[in-house]
Amino acid sequence: MAAKKMVPPNKSCLKRLRQAEKANAANRSTRSAIRTSLGIVRKAQTKEEALKEVPKLFSMMDKAAAKSRAGFSKNRASNYKAKVGHLLNKLAVSHKA
């Protein structure tokens, strides 16, 4: 049985639904782009490959945190940056060995 779509009782509810749809689309897009970029960094075989993607990734995370988008706060972005830093250090060590 399909759920009936409920009609909002007033204009402010309609506007809130429109705003929520727009925000959900923006959040989904931002989260997807960050995850894709993060995957590229994690799958990189050399430090040079990873370093090409890092500025783009950090920029996206900073913008998301500044706009409170896709569930990113300043602390969450900072934690991800630290994890990427550790990953880069591992790549540097493993590449030398």
Image: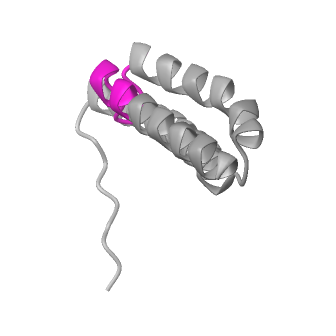
Q: Nearer the viewer, residue 2 or 26?
A: 26
Q: Nearer the viewer, residue 20 or 73?
A: 73
Q: Is residue 76 magenta?
A: yes
Q: Is residue 58 magenta?
A: no
Q: Residue at 36%, 24% (x, y): give it.
A: 78
Q: Where is the N terminus found, in terms of image quarters?
A: bottom left
75 shown above or below 44? above
Q: Residue at 64%, 30% (x, y): give it.
A: 54
Q: Nearer the viewer, residue 6 or 18?
A: 18
Q: Quadrant of residue 60?
A: top right
**Residue 33 visible in the current orientation:** yes
Q: Nearer the viewer, residue 1 or 65?
A: 65
Instruction: Specify the segment rendered in magenta.
Output: 67-79
Q: Is residue 1 left or right of residue 89?
A: left
Percent coordinates x, y for residue 6 in the rendering = 29, 55
Q: Is residue 67 left or right of residue 39?
A: left
Percent coordinates x, y for residue 15 in the rendering = 38, 26
**Residue 15 visible in the current orientation:** no
Q: Quadrant of residue 59?
A: top right
Percent coordinates x, y for residue 17 in the rendering = 37, 36
83 shown above or below 63? below
Q: Is residue 45 left or right of residue 9?
A: right
Number of on-image labels = 0
